[in-house]
Amino acid sequence: MAKMVDRVKEVMSNPERIRNIAICAHIDHGKTTLSDNLLAGAGMMSEELAGKALVLDFHDDESERGITIDSASVSMVHTVGGEDHLINLIDTPGHVDFGGDVTRAMRAVDGAVVLSCAVEGMMPQTETVLRQALKERVKPILFINKVDRLIKELKLTPEAMQDRFVKIIAEVNKKISDIAEEEYGDKWQVNVQDGSVCFGSAFHNWAMSLDYMQEKNISFKDIIDAYEQDTWKELGKKAPLHEVLLNAVIKHHPNPLESAAYRIPKIWHGDLESPLGQSLLKGDPNGPLAFCVIKVVVDPQAGEIAAGRLFSGTMNKGIEAWLNRAKKNVRTQQVYIYNGAKKEIVENVPAGNIIGLGGLKDAYPGETVTIGEQDPFEEISHLFDPVITKAIEAKKPSDLPKLIEVLVQVGKEDPSIKVEINQETGEHLMSGMGELHLEIIENRIVKEKGVEVSTTPPVVVYRETVTKKTPEQQEGKSPNKHNRLYFTVEPMSDALKQAFKDKRIHQGRVKKKDEGLWEVLRECGMDTKEARNVKNVFNGNMLLDDTRGIVQIGEIMELVNDMFEDVMKQGPVANEPSMNVIVRLVDAKLHEDAIHRGPAQMYPAVRDGIRAAYRLAGPVLFEPIQTLRFEAPAEYMGEISKLISNKRGQLLDMQQEGASVTVIGKMPVGEMFGMSSDLRSATGGRGSSFVVDQNFELLPHELQGKIVKQIRDRKGLKQE
């Protein structure tokens, strides 16, 4: 194996021969089988192990499958035309509750292999992973898996098989042109002619692409014959999956130098003319350091290991580095590369690679590691926000310190779980994507970490927003009466809301010229001057500074930003997060002496002013709504529509294909508890559901008062 490490090291510093890729697909379309095969093919895992690893399907709890960083990131060397190439592969989960993992993987890679099952075709989750890839400007290629089932189960002729492929490819291409930005929609279409579509069977270890078939002189008929004569085992020798697929990856996916030119402007919003900007665009190993963390795993021997992509500079061990989100200094310890699924310690690694790094305490996924303070990478945003919360506490008081430690760790390992730790009340809140998500995390805490816990029934996270503009500006004054700030609050225009939903507006405090942001705001109907007044974009809300000629305004802006974020996290109606709210600072009277306008004076003034303006702007609650796709045998059609209407839901679409029915419905998350067991009993265990979309809609007026009262009671707030 030592020889392999040397080969990895050799290619590592030649970026033209590196490909960083992720494998992504709908649940159960065969990702893990495929990854195991690629490893075995590259000689990194024994053939018999590849067989065993397949037994570990996704359905056992994730922890038993050991989806740690080791199985998540794998490096292998593949030779094409006598040249070694290094392929860094990230395997991603398929269940929608773990979609956060897919988004994070996309940050680190430049290409995606999208898997689609030949029998089921394109599914909701296939579309979601495509959306996540294209949002980060990651180029897709298509692998149509499970072709053996078309032959053995459906007994299709070569013509019928080709028709089926054409249909799947057309669906995928339509999605690519719908979702991708204009210039990539056409450029990134996949097609059979150039070999950016492969098909095969990961289970039986063979694959084909048009160029490979021509080169080796194999036809569709040969494949069908092999199954009919039961000689399919030889297909794996004739057309080995890893060779066909990795050839396609090397041919169609960009290397880190090519991708940097168009990916960096999308994921990094600093000054592209600065030394770091220039180095990022070139992927320069001699430039300033920039490393983006995508996953943190606690290794029993080595402590916390942060895996991620090195976009610029060279990573050495033992250097002083800066965490731009946690705002603190750290010293790097070991630098790892992945050799197969094993970690190897190396002295240093140049830009363009996916590596592991020890010593980054307090680094969460999405962290940007640089030398000295720099602009961080864009926050890794997920398609769906956590909408379900449970309070969790330790059964034995003596376990409390351990529980806090475990919750911090869980928050790092899966950042789509939000953890709030309240030392005073001892109540810790855990929010996730759905019931299953929280259940799995809870199991993990009990099983892996050995802490006995009790949890409350899950509650829903609502959003607060406003319906009209504050009639007149509201004053907030500082406790010493020397500073007065005046605010108004108003709802966002539909164009702005849409821009947030499409992720065209990036979050964060606006420190300097930001042409990109201003451009989008102008397209949404703001005038140029107004766009330049935007000081902060936080969780889908905006702060504008509309004051004029106030000398000290620059000195207090950071304090105003802090409290604006604070009120947006906990709105005045029920302390729930706000969305689609525009807050304007319209005027200010400030004490000229800086000593009289410190945080203790400014914080209450800002908070009271914004809250007062918010209360007069017609505040209401929005509830989370999920759009679900149900699948079941046709005879349960009535049962499913009854289930949807019983849960205050809306039936959007119903289609029957053969003996099965697909129903699309949307329902308030607040009514969905116990949904999976209701669905099982309504369909005799034969129905399944997937989340297709999630958004927030106005809670019906007749429920507003009741829900606000419930939330305020639960949070111990006084009823006003």
Image: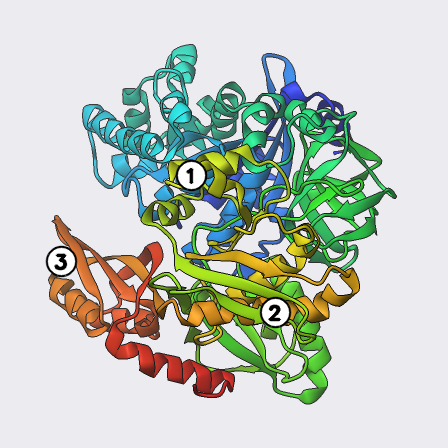
Residue 409 vs 252, above or below: the answer is below
Disc 3 designates what residue? Answer: 634
Amino acid carrying mark 3 in the image:
Ala
Q: CA distance from mark 2 to mark 1?
A: 29 Å
Q: CA distance from mark 2 to mark 3?
A: 61 Å
Q: Quadrant of residue 361?
A: bottom right
Residue drawn 58% across the image and 54% down it: 67
* Sequence-first disc among 2 and 1: 1
Circles 2 and 1: CB atoms closer than 8 Å: no
* Sequence-first disc among 2 and 3: 2
Disc 1 designates what residue? Answer: 527
Residue 527 placement (x, y as % from top left): 42, 39
- Label 3 CA crowd tier, 10 Å (few <14, some 14–19, many 20+): some
> 256 and 552: which one is in front?
552
Residue 49 vs 570, above or below: the answer is above
> 520 and 72: which one is in front?
520
* Residue 45 shows up from this direction: no
Q: Residue furthest right?
A: 318
Disc 2 designates what residue? Answer: 605
Residue 47 placement (x, y as % from top left): 57, 39
Total labels drawn: 3
Residue drawn 15% across the image and 70% down it: 642
Q: Quadrant of residue 370?
A: top right
Q: Secondary structure at mark 1?
A: loop
Residue drawn 68% across the image and 57% down it: 556
Amino acid carrying mark 1 in the image:
Asp
Circles 1 and 3: CB atoms closer than 8 Å: no
